[in-house]
Amino acid sequence: MGILASKSRETGASDPILTRIVNEDKVPWYKKPNLRFLYLMLFPTCMGIELTSGFDSQMINALQIVPSWKLFGMYIVSRMILGFGIPTCIVAGSSLIGELGYPKERPILTSLFNVAYFVGSIVAAAICFGTNNIPSNWGWRLPSILQICPSLLQITFVLFLPESPRWLISKDRSEDAFEILVKYHAEGNRESEFARAEMAQIRSTLKMEIDASRRSWSDMFKTAGMRKRVLICSMLGLFTQWSGNTLISYFLGDLLEMIGITSSIFKQKLNVGISAWGLVCAFIAAMLVTRFRRRVMYLTCTISLLICYICWTVTMQQTMSAIARGATNNAAAAATIFFIFAYSPCYNIGYNALTYTFLVELFPYAERSRGIAIFQLFGRGAGFFTTFVNPIGIGNVGWKYLISYCCWLAFEVCFVWFMFPETAGRTLEELAFIFEDKSLADKAVHAVEKVVADKDAKDAIRISEKAIAATQDEHVENVGVVRTK
């Protein structure tokens, strides 16, 4: 069976019983002490990974503007070390956020994971702006030293995080997993219907996943459904790096030079402004993930990026043509800067806000970490490629290089339209067999139904007992009244 044949109209999407139970919970997270503590610990630890990533990426861009930046050898070595550490942490951190978060807030949490990137980016941009005029090598050394701070936050607070309940269950530590679910998803109530139903759903789903899996990399290609997941996450890795964002992230100074802007101070100010604008756009997009469906947001992202890049290409051509004639076109140069800023909301609404939300939902637990690792492999490979190709392209063909991105973005629109499934509005276990036989999903649903039915039966018995007791008390009172008379 081919990859496309696995579509099967998403027959594996199960009945969202647990989601309906979650939707009945009207208490906000900040009024739940245990859940509030969990979320506060997730920010410096798991989301702190993207703080490091944002700081690192921004330094590559900002330090190229600093006049004293000279030594490249040390940066090659440091990039190799960071290139090994950051993806490993991202795979673990993004999975842990999705698996620890309460289902109601999980999409927002995994979306905020990438928002933290811009926090690190702004800090790095501001630091490099402050050290821009230091004439010695401390102009680039000081930002490099301060890059250790986000990692120190992670090391300090990671000891306060609980383990993933799904990982514990997979290691036959169900009691420990249940205690975590009770503490953080039920605020210590061991009789919680939701905690028991969630536990039953996770256990039944994991059992089916593990029974059908050999827990090896070959599982990623064994079935049509898994092959489709691998294709989607691989292309998503390419899309997040080949959509033109690396031009702005790493070569902003070169782009500004091409339209006649040479002041390093102005470049640094613009760089800080773009980073701050990116944070605003990313945060707003993250807050929208529960309001719009995944495919709608991804299609909005890709189509708007294509339009933005076409307009940017035109304004860039007009600006560079004027400079080639020995003239200036300030209106076109200003429009180019406008579209550089306009790029941020277009990119963030999909590739930033949804990336890890979508990946966590796309893969079942047994293959989730491997799926995100494949995404990282393609994403990092694409980033490595563009880091070397972009300067050659803009250096040799100028504005015409942007046409290649326009063509690629058109392909992205088509791929998202035909290949991306809808994953919104369900728990992770309800999505575990989205590309597989619906009978597998139904087995997990039956486990939840049994817990809910048992709970309803117990409630009915309690109500009946109370009713009988009340009737008996009323009878005794009536007898007492008769005897008194």
Image (cartoon, rainbow, N blue to C red):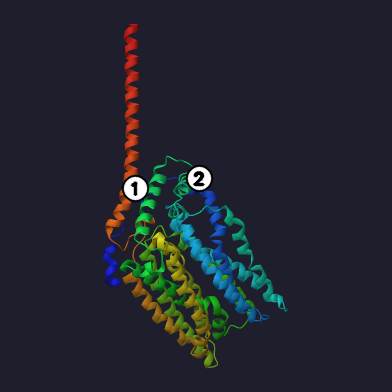
User: Closest to the observer: 169 or 75?
Assistant: 169
Q: Is mark 2 on a helix, strand or loop?
A: helix
User: Closest to the observer: 443 or 247?
Assistant: 443
Q: Residue 316 carries which label?
A: none
- Vertical comparison of 355 with 332: above or below: above
Image quadrant where residue 64 sits: bottom right
Marks 1 and 2, how far apart in space?
Answer: 27 Å
Q: What element carries label 1?
A: helix
- Of callouts 1 and 2, the N-terminal one: 2
The x, y position of residue 298, in whole percent, is: 39, 68
Q: Which mark is residue 448?
A: 1
| Farthest top residue in view | 485
The residue under the point 61% across, 77% down is 77
The residue under the point 34% across, 31% down is 463
The x, y position of residue 351, in whole percent, is: 44, 69
The x, y position of residue 403, in whole percent, is: 42, 84
Q: What residue type is labelled 2?
A: Lys
The residue under the point 32% across, 67% down is 223
Q: Which mark is residue 31?
A: 2
Q: How crowded is mark 1: few (under 14 residues within 10 Å), some or many (20 or more)?
A: many
Quadrant where the image shows the C terminus: top left
Q: Residues within 10 Å of mark 2 (few under 14, many from 20)?
A: few
Q: Which amino acid does label 1 sit on?
A: Val
Image position of 5 (left or right of 317): left
User: Closest to the observer: 309 or 48?
Assistant: 48
- Vertical comparison of 18 with 230: above or below: above
The x, y position of residue 365, in whole percent, is: 41, 59
Quadrant where the image shows the N terminus: bottom left
- Residue 230 in view of the camera: yes
Q: Which of marks 1 and 2 is in front?
A: 1
- Vertical comparison of 52 with 442: above or below: below
